[in-house]
Amino acid sequence: MAPPDFYALLGVDRAATNEQVRNAYRDCAMQHHPDRGGDPAVWSALQRAYDTLSDPQKRAVYDRTKQDGSVGAEKAFGQAFAEKGEGAAQQRGLSIEAEMAEAKGKGSTLAAAGFDMSHAQGFEAWMRNQKGMGKQSFYTAEDLLRSRQYGNIEATESTAQPLPALSATAVRFDAHGPPEEVLYVDRACSLPDKLAHGEVLVHMLAACVTDEDLLRVQTPLTVLNDFPPFNRTNNKWEAVPLPATAGVEGVGVVIATAKNVPTLKDHPLEVKDWVLLRPEARRRPAGCWSTMAVVDSSMLIKVPAQLMPVRHLACSRSLCTAYRLLEDYGSLRPGDTIIQNAADLPVGQAVIQLCKMLKIRSINLVPDDEAFEQTKELLVQLGASHVLRDNAKVGEFIDALGQMMPRLGIDSLGGEAGKRMSVALRPGGQLVMHSLQTGQVPTISPSLLMYQQISLHGFNMAQWVDENGVEAYKDMLNTIGELVQAGNLELATAEAPVRGMEPSALKAALSSHRRGAAGRPRERSVLVLGSEAAANEVYFELQASIRSMYGAEEPQTP
């Protein structure tokens, strides 16, 4: 599919000035912003167009590369990364000098409480400050029908799809607590007797065991809703009714839908569509650690069948996280150096391989355990520049670095592990946390913050999707899929079939990423829940049951 023409989206020609681009964006915002009834997908595309065309470096790269589709996946990825320039990787903020000059040129005057703003400036400021604050303004009927806040509002039965008695094998918990203690395998988990408005039945294929999965089992994050700053926004964590099925990330195939889902304006899905769980920061987990799951279609992202192997799809958030960390932080260029801990887990493996393609040196810290040599061998095969033991011996660590001073640190652990990496960074370096396996934020020395200008950042994929839109996430998945299909992104994971899983096997799957054993590096577990062939078989059985129960109804067509 050809990429969208950003100039056409905004209705400007290629010679348009920045002022013309800005005015066109404001006009589009008045018409297409979701709070004014606009289509969120169209609004997301307009935001991407404005973000690109309003930045001189991004616009220059877009003008050069938009028509270039002749290079291979690896070369195109590296070329786009290298051409973006130093300025494109930096966050754009307020230029006080430029704003004052503009105000002076327009004859603006100081008001008693500050600058007077035009209506357009005020609306632009309002939109900018709504990011991350949750739903504002009016709610549509679809919002109310899908929202769990309004449990007494239901669609008519005309949109529901009755289901026969169904059960699934699922990993469940009755109370929050340590995952190894509270999770169990339920081999006869009953499913609802119908698909309500907007819901689909998904035959799950696989799900990666991630830190987010385990956190949502261990802790009800709703406790944060009562504390600032979370109590000052509309972005609240949804409560998880217990007992519940675990799982926030996975891949599956749709095998049945509520009658309205294929015709929805937003999030339409059909039988046989392949779907991923959408990264969600606040909604309760979809419960995808199950052979079948009933999920709201707004929590799913349709992806091309066989976009990449099932194992990669199950770990797609890790791949996307690695992609964004290198793209958004450190102003990285070929020849630079990064450092990361937990380099042997999926995010770290992907970072290593992307760095190799981008000609960026990677220093990789892994557990100082019995499997260190085997882990080192694996990462070197993936393209790691250096593999070091991650332990408390800071002196040895600094000696091993020699003259290397990374521009970017990628922290998966937090606490003392993150603090050690901050010491290794060059002046002006960035330390980015994307997970906190220790549950602690790195304590960076004030001298590093003030005199070395080391900065600490947090990254969350769900937050990124909220701010940039599902379409941008799908574009990233397609790019990663091309790299995977070209053989440039491999993953080392451990498969754990859920059917017939014993308690000991479940505990092993939940903890396989924590420490390696002699001769065997640690690995993330991927729960194997089904297959495409099994999904087809279940689909036909399901349609036969529906015909038997409701003879007048026709089965849903694939």
Image: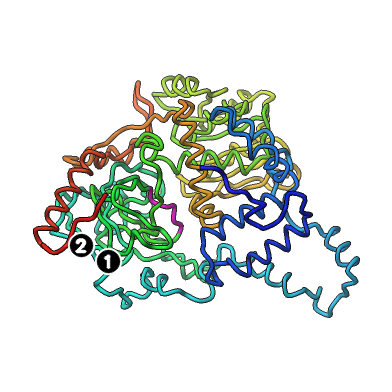
- Report whether 252 appears left or right of 117: left
The residue tagged 2 is 192
**How many angstroms separate mark 1 from mark 2 (CA)?**
9 Å
- The residue carrying mark 1 is 196
Q: Which SS does the magenta portion mostly show?
A: loop
Q: Is residue 551 above or below residue 363?
A: below
The answer to if 558 sits in the magenta stretch is no
In front of the other: 434 or 29: 29
Q: Quadrant of residue 238?
A: bottom left
Task: Count the numbered circles shown.
Answer: 2
Q: Left or right: where does residue 68 sit relative to residue 136?
A: right
Work out whether residue 367 or residue 472 is closer to the camera in this orientation and state it: 472
Measuring from the top left, give residue 370's x and y in whole percent.
Answer: 39, 24
In the picture provided, is 449 more to the left or to the right than 208? right
Measured from the top left, where is residue 200 in percent x and y? 29, 57
Going by the numbered disc 1, the residue's amino acid type is Ala
Q: Position of residue 6 (x, y in %)?
A: 64, 51
Q: Over which residues does the magenta segment extend?
A: 276-281
Q: Are marks 1 and 2 in contact (CB under 8 Å)?
A: yes
Q: Amino acid at mark 2?
A: Pro
